[in-house]
Amino acid sequence: MFFELIRLQFLKSMRSTSFAKSLMTNIFLGFIILLLLGYVFGAGLLLNRVIGQLAEGQDSLEVLNSYLIFFFLTEFLYRYFIQSLPVVDLESLLHLPIGKRKIMHMLLIRTFISPINIIALLLFLPFGLEVVGTRFGDVAFLGWLGSIVLTSWILHWFMLWFKQRFEDSTLGLLIVMGVLVLGGGSSYVGWFNLGELTKPIFDLSISSPIPVVVLFLVFLGSYWLCYRYHVANAYLEDLSSDDESRVRGQSIGFFSRFGLSGEMADIEWKLIIRHKKSRTYLMLSAFFLLYGMVFYTQPAYMENENLSFILIFVGVFITGIFMIQYGQLFLSWNSGNFDFYLQKKDGVEQLVRGKYLLFISISVICFLASIPYVYFGWKILLTHAVTFLFNVGILIHVIIYLALWKPKPMDLNKGAMFNYEGVGAAQWLMVIPMMIMPYVFYLPFALLINEYAGLAALGIFGLLGILFYKKLSAINVKRVYDNKYEISSSFRQEL
Protein backbone atom coordinates (compact mmCIF):
# COMPACT_ATOMS: atom_id res chain seq x y z
CA MET A 1 0.00 0.00 0.00
CA PHE A 2 2.89 2.37 0.71
CA PHE A 3 4.19 2.06 -2.86
CA GLU A 4 0.64 2.40 -4.20
CA LEU A 5 0.35 5.78 -2.48
CA ILE A 6 3.69 6.81 -3.97
CA ARG A 7 2.39 5.77 -7.40
CA LEU A 8 -0.78 7.84 -6.95
CA GLN A 9 1.24 10.90 -6.02
CA PHE A 10 3.43 10.37 -9.10
CA LEU A 11 0.40 10.08 -11.37
CA LYS A 12 -1.09 13.22 -9.83
CA SER A 13 2.02 15.17 -10.78
CA MET A 14 2.27 13.64 -14.28
CA ARG A 15 -1.36 14.37 -15.15
CA SER A 16 -1.33 17.95 -13.95
CA THR A 17 -1.94 20.56 -16.67
CA SER A 18 1.07 22.44 -15.37
CA PHE A 19 3.39 19.42 -15.50
CA ALA A 20 5.80 20.96 -18.02
CA LYS A 21 6.01 24.21 -16.06
CA SER A 22 6.49 22.34 -12.77
CA LEU A 23 9.13 20.11 -14.37
CA MET A 24 11.21 23.07 -15.52
CA THR A 25 10.82 24.75 -12.14
CA ASN A 26 11.87 21.57 -10.32
CA ILE A 27 14.88 21.16 -12.59
CA PHE A 28 15.94 24.73 -11.83
CA LEU A 29 15.38 24.28 -8.09
CA GLY A 30 17.21 20.94 -8.22
CA PHE A 31 20.21 22.66 -9.76
CA ILE A 32 20.12 25.37 -7.07
CA ILE A 33 19.86 22.75 -4.31
CA LEU A 34 22.79 20.75 -5.70
CA LEU A 35 24.81 23.96 -5.90
CA LEU A 36 24.02 24.85 -2.29
CA LEU A 37 24.80 21.32 -1.08
CA GLY A 38 28.09 21.55 -2.97
CA TYR A 39 28.88 24.74 -1.04
CA VAL A 40 28.03 22.96 2.22
CA PHE A 41 30.36 20.07 1.37
CA GLY A 42 33.07 22.54 0.39
CA ALA A 43 32.65 24.28 3.74
CA GLY A 44 33.04 20.87 5.39
CA LEU A 45 36.34 20.32 3.58
CA LEU A 46 37.65 23.64 4.90
CA LEU A 47 36.10 23.38 8.37
CA ASN A 48 39.24 22.12 10.13
CA ARG A 49 41.38 24.89 8.63
CA VAL A 50 38.84 27.58 9.45
CA ILE A 51 38.63 26.47 13.08
CA GLY A 52 42.43 26.34 13.24
CA GLN A 53 42.65 29.96 12.12
CA LEU A 54 39.84 31.26 14.30
CA ALA A 55 40.92 29.34 17.42
CA GLU A 56 44.68 29.21 16.91
CA GLY A 57 46.47 27.03 19.42
CA GLN A 58 43.30 25.17 20.50
CA ASP A 59 42.18 21.65 19.70
CA SER A 60 39.82 21.97 16.71
CA LEU A 61 37.73 18.98 17.84
CA GLU A 62 37.23 20.45 21.31
CA VAL A 63 36.27 23.80 19.82
CA LEU A 64 33.80 22.25 17.36
CA ASN A 65 32.12 20.09 20.00
CA SER A 66 31.60 23.14 22.20
CA TYR A 67 29.94 25.06 19.35
CA LEU A 68 27.82 22.31 17.81
CA ILE A 69 24.80 23.51 19.73
CA PHE A 70 24.81 26.72 17.68
CA PHE A 71 24.68 24.69 14.47
CA PHE A 72 21.57 22.94 15.76
CA LEU A 73 20.01 26.24 16.83
CA THR A 74 20.60 27.54 13.31
CA GLU A 75 19.14 24.34 11.94
CA PHE A 76 16.08 24.82 14.12
CA LEU A 77 15.52 28.25 12.56
CA TYR A 78 15.97 27.32 8.91
CA ARG A 79 13.87 24.18 9.36
CA TYR A 80 11.10 26.36 10.77
CA PHE A 81 11.02 28.52 7.65
CA ILE A 82 11.84 25.90 5.00
CA GLN A 83 10.59 22.52 6.17
CA SER A 84 7.14 21.73 4.79
CA LEU A 85 4.22 19.92 6.40
CA PRO A 86 2.27 17.00 4.88
CA VAL A 87 -1.12 18.53 5.71
CA VAL A 88 -1.97 19.78 2.20
CA ASP A 89 -1.57 16.33 0.64
CA LEU A 90 -3.40 14.80 3.58
CA GLU A 91 -6.64 16.59 2.69
CA SER A 92 -6.58 15.03 -0.80
CA LEU A 93 -6.11 11.49 0.56
CA LEU A 94 -8.34 11.21 3.63
CA HIS A 95 -11.52 10.55 1.61
CA LEU A 96 -9.98 7.52 -0.15
CA PRO A 97 -10.60 3.95 1.13
CA ILE A 98 -7.08 3.75 2.54
CA GLY A 99 -6.11 3.39 6.18
CA LYS A 100 -5.30 6.72 7.77
CA ARG A 101 -2.25 5.27 9.51
CA LYS A 102 -0.77 4.09 6.20
CA ILE A 103 -1.36 7.51 4.65
CA MET A 104 0.37 9.22 7.55
CA HIS A 105 3.37 6.86 7.46
CA MET A 106 3.76 7.58 3.75
CA LEU A 107 3.52 11.35 4.16
CA LEU A 108 5.94 11.48 7.10
CA ILE A 109 8.51 9.26 5.41
CA ARG A 110 8.23 11.36 2.26
CA THR A 111 9.02 14.52 4.25
CA PHE A 112 12.16 12.80 5.55
CA ILE A 113 13.52 12.41 2.01
CA SER A 114 14.80 15.97 1.82
CA PRO A 115 18.10 17.75 1.07
CA ILE A 116 17.84 19.42 4.47
CA ASN A 117 18.46 16.08 6.18
CA ILE A 118 21.88 15.56 4.60
CA ILE A 119 23.29 19.01 5.42
CA ALA A 120 24.76 17.84 8.73
CA LEU A 121 26.26 14.76 7.05
CA LEU A 122 27.89 16.77 4.23
CA LEU A 123 29.21 19.45 6.58
CA PHE A 124 30.78 17.24 9.24
CA LEU A 125 31.78 14.14 7.24
CA PRO A 126 35.07 15.60 5.92
CA PHE A 127 36.02 16.94 9.37
CA GLY A 128 35.19 13.60 10.98
CA LEU A 129 37.36 11.65 8.52
CA GLU A 130 40.23 14.10 8.77
CA VAL A 131 40.30 14.65 12.53
CA VAL A 132 38.21 12.10 14.46
CA GLY A 133 38.91 9.08 12.24
CA THR A 134 42.64 9.78 12.05
CA ARG A 135 43.08 10.29 15.79
CA PHE A 136 40.60 7.85 17.33
CA GLY A 137 39.75 5.27 14.67
CA ASP A 138 36.77 4.39 12.50
CA VAL A 139 34.47 3.33 15.35
CA ALA A 140 34.95 6.66 17.14
CA PHE A 141 34.39 8.48 13.85
CA LEU A 142 31.09 6.66 13.23
CA GLY A 143 29.94 7.32 16.79
CA TRP A 144 30.76 11.02 16.65
CA LEU A 145 29.25 11.59 13.20
CA GLY A 146 26.24 9.40 14.04
CA SER A 147 25.44 11.48 17.12
CA ILE A 148 25.45 14.69 15.05
CA VAL A 149 23.33 13.26 12.21
CA LEU A 150 20.82 11.68 14.60
CA THR A 151 20.43 14.98 16.46
CA SER A 152 19.71 16.67 13.14
CA TRP A 153 17.13 14.03 12.24
CA ILE A 154 15.47 14.34 15.65
CA LEU A 155 15.01 18.04 14.85
CA HIS A 156 13.21 16.98 11.66
CA TRP A 157 10.47 15.12 13.53
CA PHE A 158 10.36 17.71 16.28
CA MET A 159 9.82 20.50 13.73
CA LEU A 160 6.97 18.60 12.03
CA TRP A 161 5.22 18.43 15.39
CA PHE A 162 6.16 21.99 16.39
CA LYS A 163 4.90 23.64 13.19
CA GLN A 164 1.64 21.70 13.26
CA ARG A 165 1.12 22.59 16.91
CA PHE A 166 2.35 26.20 17.11
CA GLU A 167 2.82 27.64 13.60
CA ASP A 168 -0.46 29.55 13.65
CA SER A 169 -0.02 30.98 17.14
CA THR A 170 1.85 33.90 18.62
CA LEU A 171 3.48 31.47 21.05
CA GLY A 172 5.20 29.68 18.17
CA LEU A 173 6.75 32.90 16.88
CA LEU A 174 7.82 33.84 20.41
CA ILE A 175 9.52 30.46 20.82
CA VAL A 176 11.40 30.89 17.55
CA MET A 177 12.52 34.40 18.48
CA GLY A 178 13.44 33.14 21.95
CA VAL A 179 15.65 30.45 20.44
CA LEU A 180 17.39 33.12 18.36
CA VAL A 181 17.90 35.52 21.27
CA LEU A 182 18.92 32.94 23.87
CA GLY A 183 21.05 30.96 21.46
CA GLY A 184 23.09 33.83 20.09
CA GLY A 185 22.61 36.52 22.71
CA SER A 186 23.44 34.45 25.78
CA SER A 187 26.98 33.77 24.62
CA TYR A 188 27.47 37.21 23.06
CA VAL A 189 26.71 39.10 26.26
CA GLY A 190 28.35 36.49 28.48
CA TRP A 191 25.30 35.17 30.35
CA PHE A 192 26.07 31.50 29.81
CA ASN A 193 27.56 29.26 27.12
CA LEU A 194 25.04 26.77 25.75
CA GLY A 195 27.85 24.90 24.04
CA GLU A 196 29.35 23.81 27.34
CA LEU A 197 26.07 22.10 28.26
CA THR A 198 26.02 19.83 25.20
CA LYS A 199 29.76 19.38 24.64
CA PRO A 200 30.06 16.34 26.97
CA ILE A 201 27.56 14.40 24.82
CA PHE A 202 29.66 14.69 21.67
CA ASP A 203 32.90 14.16 23.61
CA LEU A 204 31.48 10.92 25.04
CA SER A 205 30.33 9.72 21.59
CA ILE A 206 33.99 9.35 20.58
CA SER A 207 34.78 6.84 23.32
CA SER A 208 31.40 5.24 24.03
CA PRO A 209 28.40 4.03 21.98
CA ILE A 210 25.96 5.21 24.68
CA PRO A 211 25.20 8.66 23.09
CA VAL A 212 24.52 7.11 19.68
CA VAL A 213 22.25 4.42 21.15
CA VAL A 214 20.33 6.95 23.25
CA LEU A 215 19.98 9.40 20.35
CA PHE A 216 18.80 6.57 18.07
CA LEU A 217 16.10 5.66 20.58
CA VAL A 218 15.13 9.33 20.86
CA PHE A 219 15.00 9.47 17.05
CA LEU A 220 12.57 6.52 16.94
CA GLY A 221 10.57 7.95 19.82
CA SER A 222 10.33 11.38 18.20
CA TYR A 223 9.06 9.80 14.97
CA TRP A 224 6.46 7.82 16.91
CA LEU A 225 5.26 10.87 18.84
CA CYS A 226 5.09 12.94 15.65
CA TYR A 227 3.19 10.14 13.93
CA ARG A 228 0.76 9.72 16.82
CA TYR A 229 0.06 13.46 16.98
CA HIS A 230 -0.62 13.74 13.24
CA VAL A 231 -2.83 10.64 13.22
CA ALA A 232 -4.82 11.95 16.18
CA ASN A 233 -5.45 15.25 14.36
CA ALA A 234 -5.88 13.92 10.81
CA TYR A 235 -9.59 14.73 10.37
CA LEU A 236 -11.11 17.05 7.80
CA GLU A 237 -13.40 18.46 10.48
CA ASP A 238 -10.39 19.36 12.63
CA LEU A 239 -8.59 20.93 9.70
CA SER A 240 -11.59 23.05 8.74
CA SER A 241 -12.31 24.08 12.33
CA ASP A 242 -8.68 25.13 12.71
CA ASP A 243 -9.05 27.35 9.66
CA GLU A 244 -12.19 28.94 11.10
CA SER A 245 -10.69 29.54 14.52
CA ARG A 246 -7.55 30.86 12.89
CA VAL A 247 -9.49 33.71 11.29
CA ARG A 248 -12.05 34.37 14.01
CA GLY A 249 -11.14 37.40 16.09
CA GLN A 250 -8.32 38.48 13.77
CA SER A 251 -10.02 41.69 12.60
CA ILE A 252 -8.32 45.01 13.27
CA GLY A 253 -10.86 47.62 14.35
CA PHE A 254 -8.56 50.47 13.34
CA PHE A 255 -9.20 49.76 9.64
CA SER A 256 -12.96 50.30 10.03
CA ARG A 257 -12.35 54.07 10.19
CA PHE A 258 -11.36 54.12 6.52
CA GLY A 259 -14.62 52.90 5.01
CA LEU A 260 -14.63 50.26 2.29
CA SER A 261 -10.87 50.55 1.77
CA GLY A 262 -10.43 49.76 5.46
CA GLU A 263 -12.65 46.69 5.11
CA MET A 264 -10.48 45.51 2.21
CA ALA A 265 -7.37 46.07 4.32
CA ASP A 266 -8.95 44.04 7.12
CA ILE A 267 -9.74 41.20 4.69
CA GLU A 268 -6.16 41.33 3.42
CA TRP A 269 -4.91 41.06 7.00
CA LYS A 270 -7.06 37.98 7.54
CA LEU A 271 -5.59 36.51 4.35
CA ILE A 272 -2.09 37.07 5.71
CA ILE A 273 -2.87 35.41 9.04
CA ARG A 274 -4.73 32.50 7.50
CA HIS A 275 -2.37 31.30 4.76
CA LYS A 276 1.06 29.78 5.07
CA LYS A 277 2.99 31.76 2.46
CA SER A 278 1.70 35.20 3.49
CA ARG A 279 2.19 34.35 7.17
CA THR A 280 5.79 33.39 6.46
CA TYR A 281 6.39 36.78 4.84
CA LEU A 282 5.01 38.47 7.95
CA MET A 283 7.28 36.47 10.26
CA LEU A 284 10.30 37.15 8.06
CA SER A 285 9.53 40.86 8.24
CA ALA A 286 9.66 40.68 12.03
CA PHE A 287 12.90 38.71 11.84
CA PHE A 288 14.55 41.19 9.45
CA LEU A 289 13.94 44.04 11.85
CA LEU A 290 17.21 42.82 13.38
CA TYR A 291 19.00 43.59 10.09
CA GLY A 292 20.40 46.80 11.54
CA MET A 293 22.53 44.85 14.01
CA VAL A 294 24.69 43.75 11.09
CA PHE A 295 25.65 47.36 10.28
CA TYR A 296 25.07 49.47 13.37
CA THR A 297 27.49 47.42 15.44
CA GLN A 298 30.30 48.01 12.90
CA PRO A 299 32.43 51.13 13.55
CA ALA A 300 33.41 51.20 9.85
CA TYR A 301 29.88 52.24 8.87
CA MET A 302 29.13 54.42 11.87
CA GLU A 303 32.35 56.47 11.97
CA ASN A 304 33.41 56.58 8.32
CA GLU A 305 31.52 59.34 6.48
CA ASN A 306 32.41 57.76 3.14
CA LEU A 307 30.49 54.62 4.09
CA SER A 308 27.63 56.13 6.08
CA PHE A 309 25.50 56.42 2.92
CA ILE A 310 24.98 52.64 3.12
CA LEU A 311 22.81 53.25 6.17
CA ILE A 312 20.16 54.73 3.83
CA PHE A 313 19.62 51.30 2.32
CA VAL A 314 19.47 49.75 5.81
CA GLY A 315 16.79 52.25 6.85
CA VAL A 316 14.73 51.61 3.70
CA PHE A 317 15.02 47.86 4.27
CA ILE A 318 14.06 47.91 7.96
CA THR A 319 11.11 50.30 7.74
CA GLY A 320 9.76 48.90 4.47
CA ILE A 321 10.62 45.20 4.56
CA PHE A 322 7.02 43.97 4.61
CA MET A 323 5.96 46.39 1.88
CA ILE A 324 8.89 45.22 -0.25
CA GLN A 325 8.38 41.49 0.29
CA TYR A 326 4.60 41.30 0.29
CA GLY A 327 4.08 44.10 -2.22
CA GLN A 328 6.14 42.47 -4.94
CA LEU A 329 3.27 39.96 -5.36
CA PHE A 330 0.68 42.72 -5.13
CA LEU A 331 -2.33 41.13 -6.88
CA SER A 332 -1.07 37.55 -6.98
CA TRP A 333 -2.29 37.14 -3.41
CA ASN A 334 -5.83 37.64 -4.73
CA SER A 335 -5.48 35.50 -7.86
CA GLY A 336 -8.07 33.02 -6.57
CA ASN A 337 -10.84 35.62 -6.13
CA PHE A 338 -9.83 38.49 -8.40
CA ASP A 339 -13.00 38.02 -10.52
CA PHE A 340 -15.06 38.73 -7.41
CA TYR A 341 -13.57 42.21 -7.14
CA LEU A 342 -14.15 42.83 -10.85
CA GLN A 343 -17.88 42.24 -10.38
CA LYS A 344 -18.20 44.63 -7.45
CA LYS A 345 -18.74 48.35 -7.93
CA ASP A 346 -15.37 50.05 -7.30
CA GLY A 347 -14.17 46.65 -6.09
CA VAL A 348 -10.75 46.82 -7.77
CA GLU A 349 -10.15 50.40 -6.67
CA GLN A 350 -11.02 49.64 -3.05
CA LEU A 351 -8.88 46.47 -3.14
CA VAL A 352 -5.85 48.44 -4.31
CA ARG A 353 -6.40 51.25 -1.82
CA GLY A 354 -6.95 48.71 0.96
CA LYS A 355 -3.58 47.20 0.19
CA TYR A 356 -2.03 50.66 0.31
CA LEU A 357 -3.56 51.16 3.74
CA LEU A 358 -2.26 47.81 4.99
CA PHE A 359 1.28 48.45 3.69
CA ILE A 360 1.43 51.88 5.27
CA SER A 361 0.07 50.59 8.60
CA ILE A 362 2.64 47.79 8.87
CA SER A 363 5.42 50.17 7.77
CA VAL A 364 4.42 52.43 10.68
CA ILE A 365 4.72 49.44 13.03
CA CYS A 366 8.13 48.56 11.57
CA PHE A 367 9.32 52.13 12.09
CA LEU A 368 8.08 52.19 15.69
CA ALA A 369 9.75 48.80 16.32
CA SER A 370 13.03 50.23 15.00
CA ILE A 371 13.09 53.16 17.43
CA PRO A 372 15.29 51.25 19.96
CA TYR A 373 18.09 51.54 17.39
CA VAL A 374 18.46 55.09 18.75
CA TYR A 375 20.82 53.36 21.19
CA PHE A 376 23.41 53.55 18.40
CA GLY A 377 22.86 57.28 17.93
CA TRP A 378 20.23 59.87 17.06
CA LYS A 379 21.46 59.83 13.48
CA ILE A 380 20.11 56.27 13.12
CA LEU A 381 16.66 57.34 14.31
CA LEU A 382 16.72 60.30 11.90
CA THR A 383 17.70 57.99 9.03
CA HIS A 384 14.88 55.60 9.86
CA ALA A 385 12.38 58.49 10.03
CA VAL A 386 13.24 59.94 6.62
CA THR A 387 13.50 56.54 4.92
CA PHE A 388 10.10 55.65 6.37
CA LEU A 389 8.62 58.81 4.86
CA PHE A 390 10.28 58.00 1.54
CA ASN A 391 8.95 54.43 1.64
CA VAL A 392 5.30 55.37 2.21
CA GLY A 393 5.45 58.48 0.03
CA ILE A 394 7.43 57.37 -3.04
CA LEU A 395 8.75 53.82 -3.00
CA ILE A 396 5.39 52.18 -2.26
CA HIS A 397 3.98 53.48 -5.56
CA VAL A 398 7.01 52.30 -7.53
CA ILE A 399 6.87 48.79 -6.04
CA ILE A 400 3.16 48.44 -6.77
CA TYR A 401 3.60 49.81 -10.30
CA LEU A 402 6.25 47.17 -11.08
CA ALA A 403 4.28 44.41 -9.37
CA LEU A 404 1.35 45.07 -11.73
CA TRP A 405 3.42 44.08 -14.75
CA LYS A 406 1.92 40.72 -15.82
CA PRO A 407 1.08 39.35 -12.33
CA LYS A 408 0.89 35.56 -12.08
CA PRO A 409 -1.39 33.21 -10.09
CA MET A 410 -0.24 31.75 -6.80
CA ASP A 411 -1.26 29.03 -4.33
CA LEU A 412 -1.44 30.66 -0.88
CA ASN A 413 -1.16 27.40 1.06
CA LYS A 414 2.35 26.63 -0.12
CA GLY A 415 5.41 27.80 1.79
CA ALA A 416 7.46 30.83 0.79
CA MET A 417 10.89 29.18 0.69
CA PHE A 418 11.98 27.92 -2.76
CA ASN A 419 8.48 28.67 -4.07
CA TYR A 420 8.46 30.89 -7.16
CA GLU A 421 4.73 30.92 -7.87
CA GLY A 422 3.60 34.44 -8.67
CA VAL A 423 7.18 35.56 -9.34
CA GLY A 424 7.94 37.07 -12.72
CA ALA A 425 10.56 39.30 -14.27
CA ALA A 426 9.21 42.37 -12.47
CA GLN A 427 9.76 40.76 -9.08
CA TRP A 428 13.41 40.05 -9.88
CA LEU A 429 13.96 43.59 -11.20
CA MET A 430 12.17 45.26 -8.30
CA VAL A 431 15.30 45.25 -6.17
CA ILE A 432 16.93 47.75 -8.56
CA PRO A 433 14.65 50.76 -7.85
CA MET A 434 14.54 49.79 -4.19
CA MET A 435 18.33 50.19 -4.01
CA ILE A 436 18.80 53.06 -6.46
CA MET A 437 15.82 55.41 -5.97
CA PRO A 438 16.65 56.59 -2.41
CA TYR A 439 20.13 57.58 -3.59
CA VAL A 440 18.72 59.45 -6.61
CA PHE A 441 17.16 61.88 -4.13
CA TYR A 442 19.86 61.65 -1.44
CA LEU A 443 23.21 61.86 -3.22
CA PRO A 444 22.86 65.20 -5.10
CA PHE A 445 22.12 67.09 -1.88
CA ALA A 446 24.59 65.06 0.18
CA LEU A 447 27.42 65.70 -2.29
CA LEU A 448 26.65 69.38 -2.86
CA ILE A 449 25.89 70.30 0.76
CA ASN A 450 26.19 67.53 3.39
CA GLU A 451 24.61 64.23 4.41
CA TYR A 452 21.94 65.92 6.55
CA ALA A 453 20.78 67.89 3.50
CA GLY A 454 20.49 64.54 1.70
CA LEU A 455 18.41 63.13 4.52
CA ALA A 456 16.23 66.24 4.49
CA ALA A 457 15.67 65.79 0.75
CA LEU A 458 14.55 62.20 1.27
CA GLY A 459 12.12 63.25 3.97
CA ILE A 460 10.72 66.20 1.98
CA PHE A 461 10.12 64.16 -1.16
CA GLY A 462 8.51 61.47 1.00
CA LEU A 463 6.18 64.07 2.55
CA LEU A 464 5.27 65.38 -0.90
CA GLY A 465 4.43 61.82 -1.94
CA ILE A 466 2.16 61.48 1.09
CA LEU A 467 0.43 64.81 0.33
CA PHE A 468 -0.20 63.71 -3.28
CA TYR A 469 -1.07 60.16 -2.27
CA LYS A 470 -4.45 60.12 -4.03
CA LYS A 471 -3.04 61.24 -7.37
CA LEU A 472 -0.09 58.82 -7.21
CA SER A 473 -2.22 55.87 -6.12
CA ALA A 474 -4.73 56.69 -8.88
CA ILE A 475 -2.00 55.86 -11.43
CA ASN A 476 -1.80 52.28 -10.18
CA VAL A 477 -5.59 51.98 -9.83
CA LYS A 478 -5.99 53.06 -13.47
CA ARG A 479 -3.30 50.58 -14.50
CA VAL A 480 -5.24 47.74 -12.89
CA TYR A 481 -8.46 48.80 -14.63
CA ASP A 482 -6.71 49.11 -17.99
CA ASN A 483 -5.32 45.59 -17.71
CA LYS A 484 -8.04 43.92 -15.65
CA TYR A 485 -9.11 41.41 -18.31
CA GLU A 486 -5.54 40.38 -19.07
CA ILE A 487 -4.81 40.01 -15.35
CA SER A 488 -8.01 38.04 -14.77
CA SER A 489 -7.22 35.70 -17.69
CA SER A 490 -3.74 35.09 -16.31
CA PHE A 491 -5.12 34.28 -12.85
CA ARG A 492 -7.51 31.68 -14.29
CA GLN A 493 -4.59 29.57 -15.47
CA GLU A 494 -4.17 26.46 -13.35
CA LEU A 495 -0.96 26.29 -11.35
Image: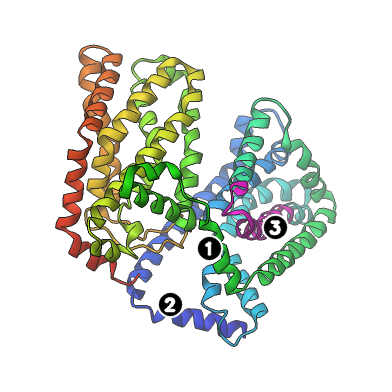
Question: What kind of element bears circle 2?
Answer: helix
Amino acid beneath label 2: Ser
Q: Earlier in the sequence, mark 3 or mark 2?
A: 2
Query: Which residue has dot 1 on it?
Result: 243
Q: Does the magenta portion include 162?
A: yes
x and y, in percent, of residue 351 in the image: 29, 53
Q: Is residue 27 depicted above or below 56 in this figure?
A: below
Query: Label 1: how many residues lie within 10 Å, few (<14), some (14-19) or many (20+)?
Result: some
Query: Label 3: how many residues lie within 10 Å, few (<14), some (14-19) or many (20+)?
Result: some
- Give 380 or 83, whichever is nearer the viewer: 380
Q: Earlier in the sequence, mark 1 or mark 2?
A: 2
For the record, the magenta segment spans 145-172
Question: On the picture, is 147 further left or further right than 381?
Answer: right
Residue at image point 35% right, 15% down: 305
Amino acid beneath label 3: Ile
Query: Which residue has dot 3 on it?
Result: 154
